[in-house]
Amino acid sequence: MKGYEIFEQKYLKDYFGEEGLAPYENKIGFLDFLRELKSGTQGIPSSSSFMVVGIDDVLYLAGRDERKMLALTIHKILQSSAKVLDQKIIEVQIVCKGRLYKGESFWSEYRGEKLPLDYIFGTPNKRDIRECPVYSTGFNLSS
C-alpha cells in the first residue's frame, strides 16, 4: 500500500549526496497539489509520482492561531482523495524544509515555529532509507 512519505529536504540527493533520496518525477507546490485533489483526480495519471514541496510555508504563513484549523482542513482534502490515489497507485513525497520531530505528536520546526503535522498525517511510522529518516502513512491517514 502506497501513501505519503514525509522527510526533510536536506535528505534529497541534491543536498545529501548519492546516499540521499531521489526526488519523484513531478515536482509540485503543496497548494497546487491540494487544488488538483479538490478539483478531482481525473487529471492525475495512474502510476505517477509527485514530490510535493511547501507544506512548511503554507502552515507557517497561516499564523499561529489558524494553523490547527488549516491542518484539519488539509487533512480532510487529502483523506477525501485517498481511495482514488490508492487505486491509481500514486506515489507522493512530502518534502519539508523544517526539521521533523516525532514524539507524542508529529511536527516540523520551521523558522522557530512548531508546525502541527500530526493534525494532517496522524502519527506516521518512521523508517530509515540509507540513513535518511522517512515518515510514512497511508493515503487514508488513519494511522
Image (cartoon, rainbow, N blue to C red):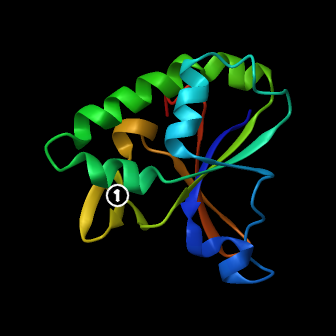
Q: Give x and y (percent) for residue 76.
A: 42, 22
Q: Give x and y (percent) for residue 26.
A: 76, 48
Left/right of residue 6 with respect to residue 61 in the rendered view: right
Q: Is residue 105 visible?
A: no
Q: In which quadrant of the rendered view does residue 43 lie?
A: top right
Which quarter of the rendering shows the N terminus?
top right
Q: Residue at (85%, 27%) from the top-left corner?
A: 46
Left/right of residue 71 with respect to residue 16 in the rendered view: left
- Element assignment for label 1: loop
- Pointer 1: residues within 10 angstroms few (<14), some, or many (20+)? few
Does 11 appear above or below 68? below
Q: Give x and y (percent) for residue 75.
A: 42, 30
Does 65 appear above or below 27? above
Mark 1 lies on residue:
103
Q: Residue at (66%, 80%) from the top-left corner?
A: 15
Left/right of residue 64 with respect to residue 36 in the rendered view: left
> How many circles with numbers are drawn on the protein?
1
Left/right of residue 80 with respect to residue 41 in the rendered view: left
Q: In which quadrant of the rendered view does residue 119 lie?
A: top left
Does 97 appear above or below 140? below
Does 135 appear above or below 10? above
Q: Residue at (41%, 56%) from the top-left corner?
A: 56
Q: Which amino acid does label 1 sit on?
A: Gly
Q: Is residue 35 visible?
A: yes
Q: Give x and y (percent) for residue 24.
A: 77, 53
Q: Residue furthest bottom?
A: 17
